[in-house]
Amino acid sequence: MIIEIADFTVRPGTEDEFAAAFREARPLLAATPGFLGARMTRGIESPSRFVLLVEWENVEAHTDGFRNSDRYPRWRELIGPFFAGDPHVEHAVEVPASA
């Protein structure tokens, strides 16, 4: 399993609209083979900052399965208008708590 970490800053004053757009767009992620789960967080000190954490079976499920799908343009259409800049997206693996 890998975790996609997407860091978004949205235009101030549009935070609630962005959160609603994400709720509408989330099923587009969930419909992707290899999708395992997702959660969106919102900053307390920086309320215009959101971090999306998506669990995928592998990187390709995200990069090929979602980004190259017909669902991705709709995803960007729903959430993209709220961005204050380009999102920062990385992939990570979990570090085991014990060896």
Image (spheres, helix red, strand yellow):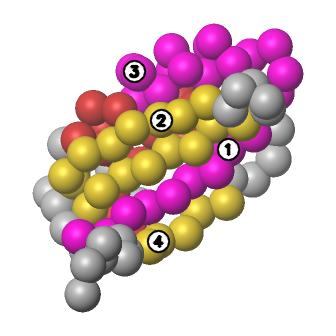
First to last magenta residue range = 1-25
User: Real-space Cα distance between discs 4 and 3?
Assistant: 24 Å
Looking at the image, residue 25 lies above or below residue 67: above
Q: Which residue is mark 2?
A: 40
Whether pointer 1 and pointer 2 mark residues with C-beta atoms closer than 8 Å, the reply is: no
User: Real-space Cα distance between discs 1 and 3?
Assistant: 17 Å
- Residue 34 in percent (x, y) is at 17, 61
Label 1 SS: strand
- Nearer-the-camera pick, 45 or 14: 45
- Nearer-the-camera pick, 72 or 19: 19
Q: Which residue is mark 3?
A: 24
Q: What is the residue that sits farthest to the left in this orientation? A: 33
- Residue 89 in percent (x, y) is at 58, 63
Q: Which residue is mark 4?
A: 91
Residue 8: which numbered mark, if any? 1
Looking at the image, residue 32 lies above or below residue 13: below
N-terminal of the two: label 3 or label 2? 3
Tell me the kind of residue under disc 3: Glu
Please state the total of marks drawn on the protein image: 4
- Nearer-the-camera pick, 18 or 64: 18
N-terminal of the two: label 2 or label 4? 2
- Nearer-the-camera pick, 18 or 65: 18
